[in-house]
Amino acid sequence: MGRVTERRRVIRIRDGAVSARPDTLVAEEPLEIRLNGKPLAITMRTPGDDFALAAGFLVSEGVVGRAEELANIVYCAGATADGGNTYNVVDVRLAPGVPVPDITLERNVYTTSSCGLCGKASLDAVRTTARWPVGDEERTPVRVSPETLSVLPDRLRAAQRVFDRTGGLHAAALFTPDGELLDVREDVGRHNAVDKLVGRALREGLLPLAGAVLLVSGRASFELAQKAVMAGIPVLAAVSAPSSLAVDLAAETGLTLVGFLRGAAMNVYAGEHRIALGDAVEST
């Protein structure tokens, strides 16, 4: 198994003083995801939770949605020069009867740590039909207060153990509407961190995540909104800006999208019915 961090020599300059010392860096290695033995995608990720990452990726692609649809996930191939295993190739086997998607060049994609679901032929191809509506308002009504949202970034930051050593990781976390931390994952790619969360939930039989709030440490891109929708998550919050396409998708699907979440300040771009805003909202 690859290490989460690695050490490298660095020249450190502080107030004119120069010194040589080791520095702790976040590890970044490729992971090839195969489906029933056929290559599907390659993503640059931080090693760890690879099976969850692969499972979450398949949820985002609309391939699986329940734990029983997975037969197993195993490491394979990827031998090193000395005959060892790089643990950089995983093969996901679907359960009997689960449809296997057509793996064409459009789906066989290279995913970098910053682009997420790249290589799609068109926007329509990315708008995968979700298995569940975003939030079941009758069975699982979700309401979250601005006060609760305001403390979530600090709770996420406090749970980022690897970030403390490297300063180079994105993070994603699931919270209850009351602000209880359910799970947190770190990765060099923000989309990988979300896939790891969703994959863990899938394997534990917790999908759809109809009562959860997803917080991401960076911006809210279309791909992250898509992943939230595919997992049935009703609220997505980000500490930075959303993209226009993420806002459009949130409005179309009923996803609550919050951006620029920094302390008591935040912007609600869609789905404001889940935010306890009080009786009046000023219009300008």
Image: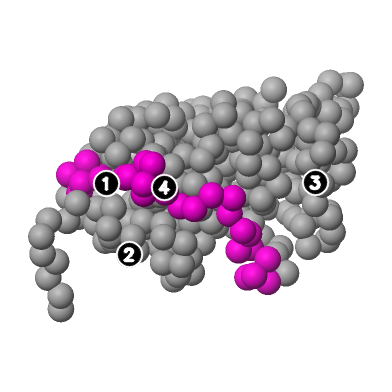
Which of the labelled discs sits on residue 143, or is there none?
Answer: 1
Q: Amino acid at mark 2?
A: Tyr
Mark found first going from the N terminus, 2 or 4: 4
* Number of numbered labels in the structure image: 4
- Amino acid type at circle 1 is Arg
Magenta segment includes 134: yes
- Disc 4 marks which residue? 136
**Residue shown at 15% from the left, 75% from the top:** 283
The residue at 42%/49% (across/down) is 135
Residue at mark 3: 99
Q: What crowding class fits label 3: few (fewer than 14 Cα within 10 Å), some (14-19), or many (20 or more)?
A: few
* Label annotation for residue 90: none
Name the quadrant containing residue 26.
Answer: top right
Judge whether residue 65 can be spotted in this image.
Answer: yes
Of marks 3 and 4, which one's residue comes earlier in the chain?
Answer: 3
Spatial CA distance of label 1 from label 4 is 12 Å
Magenta segment's dominant SS is loop
Alpha carbon separation for disc pair 2 and 3: 36 Å
Kindly state the secondary structure of the residue where label 4 is placed.
loop
Name, please, the residue furthest toward the bottom: 284
Q: Nearer the viewer, mark 3 or mark 4?
A: 4
Along the polypeptide, which appears first: circle 1 or circle 2?
Answer: 1
User: Mark 2 = which residue?
Assistant: 269
Q: Where is residue 76 shown, x and y percent of the image?
A: 83, 28
- The answer for how far apart the CA atoms under marks 1 and 2 are is 16 Å
The kind of secondary structure element at disc 2 is strand
Q: Is residue 75 left or right of residue 157?
A: right
CB contact under 8 Å: marks 1 and 2:
no
Q: Nearer the viewer, mark 1 or mark 4?
A: 4
